[in-house]
Amino acid sequence: MKCIVAGHQAVTEAEFTELALGTPVELWLGVEGETDEERAARLDAARDILADPEYRSLPDDLIRLAARVVEDHPDLFNVVPLARPARRRAARTGVAA
């Protein structure tokens, strides 16, 4: 099945996400090994996008997208309680009377 949005064909999950957000995911999450200068430029571009009236709803869109992921894939968030180690009691050192 093909999914074409605004003339772009999405094939991978990353492409679907990029089409849903209107921006590449890497803009918001960064990439492994980016330099401090690259990070600063990426964050500056992200701030410019958020200031654009066209993208004013982007934070709400991201929250809806995250909520949909949680709803569609609850198994990603299975939390298993870990056993707590027994508390160690400090040794009492008493003063002999």
Image (tube, rainbow, N blue to C red):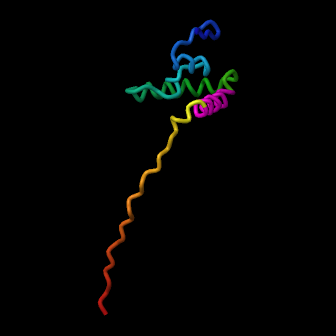
Look at the image and say whether residue 92 sits in the magenta stretch: no
Please name whichever residue, 94 or 47, is drawn nearer the observer in this view of the structure: 94
Quadrant of the drawing holding the N terminus: top right
Q: Name the residue: 43% across, 51% down.
A: 82
- In the image, is 79 to the left or to the right of 34? right
Residue extending farthest left: 96
Q: Quadrant of residue 63?
A: top right
Residue 45 x/y as whole percent: 55, 23
Vertical order, 35 against 93 (above or below) = above
Look at the image and say whether residue 64 sits in the magenta stretch: yes
Q: Main secondary structure of the magenta part?
A: helix
Please name whichever residue, 95 or 83, is drawn nearer the observer in this view of the structure: 83
Q: What stretch is highlighted in magenta?
A: 57-71
Residue extending farthest bottom: 97
Q: Name the residue: 50% across, 25% down.
A: 42
Quadrant of the drawing holding the C terminus: bottom left
Residue extending farthest top: 7
